[in-house]
Image (cartoon, rainbow, N blue to C red):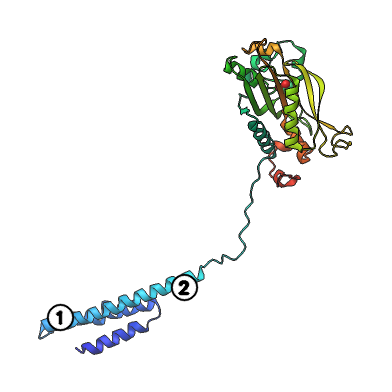
Amino acid sequence: MEKDIIIKELSEKINNVKSIQELNDVKVEYTGKKGIITELQNGIKDAVDKKEYGMTLNEIKNAFNDAFNKKQEELNNLEINKKLESEKIDITLPATELPVGAPSILEKVIEDFEDVFMSMGYDVVDGPELEEDRFNFELLGLPKGHPARDAQDTFYVKGDELLMRSHTSPVQARTMLAKGGKEPVRIICPGKAYRRDDDDATHSHQFTQIEGLLVDKDISLANLKATFDVIAKKLFGEERETRFRPSFYPFTEPSVEMDISCFNCGGKGCPICKGTGWITVGGAGIVHHNVLDNCGYDSNKWTGFAFGFGAERLAMLKYGITDIRTFYTNDLRIKDTFERKDV
Ligand code: DAH
């Protein structure tokens, strides 16, 4: 057996292969059923010196395995490098653009209010949307049969005691009762309200109010005016002016409508303020003594003011939205259709 020749030959063959496939062919050629090494192995039975023959055979086998493993690793590495090369990502290419969302304009208006009121020491509270008649009406000075109930066409859910709240004012009663008439109150409550309305561009059966209540000692309309002034300037611009107009709400006395000078024309008159120079943004007043007494606050000791803003109306004015239904129809184009003053 010409050991050296065999080893030289198999080394050359293995060294010359260019692929795993070719390497496997060489393997079959040597170790397959009729392979060269297999035949040599079968020859051991006829060998004169079996020990010597076996040792030489082992040398050949080891030489084959070493060369084979080395080549196999080499080819595998080559394969990996080729893959890395072909699958490499060009990070300098522009990225695929993913659609991104935008904060809801309504949420944005509410958060702006929350920020200003929190900076003045108010808490932001919540109340149920499914409400009891007594919180929504009775405790606020609207007993059954009161004509002012008609202005709030209400969704009754069960008999005439359970309803979808027609405003966020019931949270005033809930908060005062929870505080037990002992400590001052300073809250705002942004939330949904519901009324039986025929939906059109300016009416929606669902809408959002931002309710506010402050109860303390010696509170007057002047405190309400000063607070409203801060809100108007912070949310609509430092040059805004404010005014009150007399109004009526059963839960406040006196009651007012809150106007700000038009942020579009500065008060000169334009289509947005319908030529008046003023825009009404909510109702307010001094908390009626009956409401304080109904809710556990002795009206001889405590006084307060309350207000309610319409969030959709504010958002519509601020962002030039002309149809209130836009807020509720889930058309995603809302996020980039309107003139967004915040982006
Ligand atoms: N709840 C009133 C409405 O829905 C708005 C309102 C007016 C709330 C005056 C108040 C207030 O707290 O003092 O029309």
In the structure shown, which secondary structural element does the residue marked by tag 1 occupy?
Answer: helix
Classify the position of the N terminus by image quarter.
Answer: bottom left
Which quadrant holds residue 54?
A: bottom left
Horizontal side of 186 relative to 310 (left or right) equals: left
Q: Position of residue 219 (x, y in %)?
A: 70, 19
| Residue at 74 percent of width and 27 percent of height | 226
In the structure shown, which secondary structural element does the residue marked by tag 2 occupy?
Answer: helix
Q: Position of residue 13 (x, y in %)?
A: 33, 84
Which quadrant holds residue 294?
A: top right
Relative to 5, is 97 above or below?
A: above
Give the residue type at disc 1. Gly
Q: CA distance from mark 1 to mark 2?
A: 41 Å
Label number found at residue 82: 2
Residue 158 visible in this rendered orientation of the protein? no
Q: Which residue is mark 1?
A: 54
Label number found at residue 160: none
Give the residue type at disc 2. Lys
Residue 273 visible in this rendered orientation of the protein? yes
